[in-house]
Amino acid sequence: MIFLSRKWVLLLNRFGLILAKTYGEKFKSKAFLITTIIFALSIIVGTNFQTIMDSFGSDDGESGSGEGWTVAVYDEEGSVAAALEQQIHIVNQNITIENSDKELEELERQVEAGEYDALLTVSLQDSGKISANYLSESLSTNGNSADLQLSLQTIQSNLAAAKLNLSADELATLNMPVAFEQSSFLETAKSEEELNEARGLVYIMIFVIYMSVLIYSLMIATEVATEKSSRVMEILVSSVPPIQQIFAKIVGIGLLGLTQLAFWAITGFISIRFSRDSLEGGIYSLFDFSANSIETISFGIIFFLLGYFLFATLAAFLGSLVSRTEDIQQMMMPVNLLIIAGAMLAFYGLADPEANFITITSYIPFFSPLVMFTRVGMLNIPLWEPMVAIALTLAAIFIIGWFGAKVYRGGVLMYGNSSSFKDMKKALILSKKEK
């Protein structure tokens, strides 16, 4: 028993040394620090974007600033321009309507010369329909043109109501949207408000899981290939069991990833708290966490860890087959395609989470971290369904880890142009010889 305990202590010490080495080197690297800082700054800018834009202001009225926007109106019949001048002040007080009696060609020249910001040509047809043509220097922004169109739509409705002898109340009733509410006969079904909140939160979590797994898996494969090219592996593989090496590196870079994500999450949380007064509705409503949000985030963390360990294990032993870091992208291509396929299925699942192929693929380990998480967020499914997916993914991790350790032991001893899946057989043969 004493011998066994000493053996386990020695193994844990070696595991800890490799883990600490992997974490420490990556944490101190310039690439990690620069990426972390740049993304944190991006979060701060994103959460304070409206405040920043307001502080800089804008150079023209079209972009929505407080400056005036003068529009020359060419109305040959003279029946629309006067009504438009009154209506536009209700919609946008920054727009000034100037009803001109000049020729159309002269007005076009004045707009091109900058005397007017835009030219609006309007005509009222016999049917009561208004036709309009909007001319301005740039069509890249359309805030004021949209307000003009809305005003003309209101005028057209008023003219039609007058022909039909409709009162203002009758016209308002005619344009009133239908009151349409949705409900489910199942008590456990999520409400429309809960679904909208879950959809936004799941979208964010899918993106985080997808990007994190993609980046950190590649980081592990690069780490293994770099050490192999420096011949460090020949020393490590003779003193530390391969499965220990694989999971020590995986856990080390996993902790690095969690450190980075935690830093970004804290930065975002603090930034949102400071700028909360200017953030209303939309995506920012997701940060008022309800019980459902906390449950979704909890499953998101679980599936993030499962997805990371699954693809990181794959990346580690595939990286051991590569002798040059230039060949990593080629070897990692199938892994990247699996991750991308899982993300595409998950995004489709946001629109139709009850589709049969979404349900089936949510149990496949390579897709479960993203697809089952989508179903958990969007539907009230029984607890046994995500638990089955978690169990299957854990089983896949251990199987890949066991097989990967065998390939890893032989793969790190292979040199030359070894960037093909055929090299797995050679790695397994070398692994048996080393025993």
Image (cartoon, helix red, strand yellow):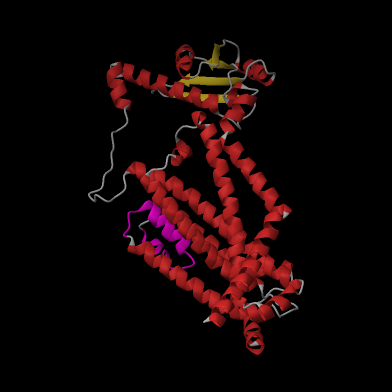
Instruction: Look at the picture and state if 279 lies above or below 152.
Output: below
Seen as rendered, the residue at the extreme front is: 2
Which residue is more in the foreground, 300 or 189? Answer: 300
| Residue 220: quadrant of the picture | bottom right
Residue 329 visible in the current orientation: no
Residue range of the region highlighted in magenta in the rendering: 355-382
Q: Position of residue 420 (x, y in %)?
A: 66, 77
- SS majority, magenta: helix
Q: Is residue 354 left or right of residue 231?
A: left
Which residue is more in the foreground, 289 or 422? Answer: 289
Instruction: Look at the picture and state if 273 lies above or below 88.
Output: below
* In magenta segment, residue 367: yes
Q: Going 50% across and 19% down the picture, which residue do you hit? A: 92
Q: Going 49% across and 63% down the picture, which residue do you hit? A: 306
Q: Position of residue 108 (x, y in %)?
A: 64, 20
Which quadrant: the C terminus? bottom right
Q: Position of residue 307 (x, y in %)?
A: 51, 63
Which residue is more in the foreground, 177 or 84? Answer: 177
Residue 280 visible in the current orientation: yes
Q: Position of residue 386 (x, y in %)?
A: 38, 62
Instruction: Look at the picture and state if 249 lies above or below 267.
Output: below
Seen as rendered, the residue at the extreme bottom is: 433
Q: Going 41% across and 19% down the picture, which residue do you hit? A: 155
* In magenta segment, residue 264: no
